[in-house]
Image: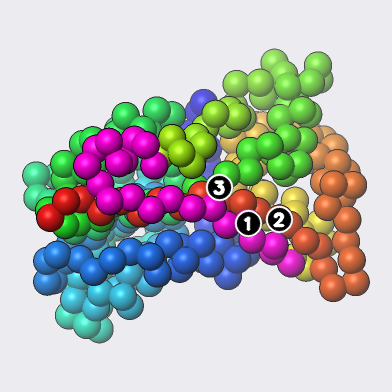
Amino acid sequence: MPAPTWDPAQYLRHAGHRARPFADLLARVPGLPTDPPRIADLGCGPGNVTTLLADRWPAANITGYDNSPEMLADAAAHAGPTPGGGRLDFAPADATTWAPPARTYDLILSNATLQWVEGHLDAFPAWLDALTPGGTFAFQVPHNIHAPLHALMRELGTGIRWKDRLGDVLRHVDSVHAPEVYLDRLARLGCDTDVWETTYLHVLHGEDPVLDWVKGTGLRPVLTALADDPEARDAFVAEYRDLLRQAYPTAGYGTVLPFRRLFAVARKEA
């Protein structure tokens, strides 16, 4: 699947809702073994939630990694010394090939990124090796690939009209594994592991808010693949919009988007 082109402004239109899972993940991360700690945020996006790491560990040296030049350009605004005496930096890296540098980390964290990384389970041993004893690997991923949000996109994209152009660009149904798969893999690697799921009921507002949401994330591969054909892009989006309107009806208080996410916190043996 080709790497999508990201739009930080579109992504941040729902920044409050998107930040909640990061905060919930962070709340379950235990104390870190080194003071000041070294932290890697893998798939940091525009960096707005990476700053929350500096709130939790004010003296930490934090590096956010992302493979999107557009996202890193936005993240750069958050770079520099932190009020607590630490430092926040950002660097280009692709999670599909990222190898931790020689120095170890106290925390490797990934927020809504691993669903884009085929074979990410195979990366866990090397990432855990890069942790200081007693350090933590923590991540969250969307676990809603069968929800209408994605199912309708796949149905449309693999239909007769679009399959030649879009059949290979959409996320596969196995891009995220069952919770027990992650628990088993991390526990067998010697970690004290906590895995759980949460379904958020996001109440969205505005015209076609679910379409607006997915334009910042899951629809990016389609928008990238059709970027050189605006007429086709607009036609696909219009068809998809009409399907989403039926699947996610609007009430007087807004449009409800149920969104299930999977979390894992794995602490390496001290």
Res 208 → quadrant? bottom right
Disc 1 target residue: 199
- Badges 2 and 1: C-beta atoms under 8 Å apart? yes
Residue 223 in sight in this render: no
Disc 2 target residue: 258
- Magenta region's main secondary structure? strand
Would you call the spot at circle 3 few (<14 residues within 10 Å), some (14-19), or many (20 or more)? many
| Nearer-N-terminus badge (3/2) | 3
Which label is found at residue 30? none
Over which residues does the magenta segment extend? 183-203
Query: Which residue sits furthest bottom?
Result: 83
| Magenta segment includes 17 | no
C-alpha separation, residue under disc 1 versus residue under disc 3: 10 Å
Query: Which residue sits furthest left?
Result: 102
Q: Is residue 248 above or below residue 48?
A: above
Inspect the image, locate mark 3, and give the three-letter code of the amino acid beneath it.
Pro
Disc 3 target residue: 142
Q: In this view, does 156 lie above or below 89?
A: above
Would you call the spot at circle 1 few (<14 residues within 10 Å), some (14-19), or many (20 or more)? some
C-alpha separation, residue under disc 2 versus residue under disc 1: 6 Å
Quarter of the image with the C terminus in it: bottom left
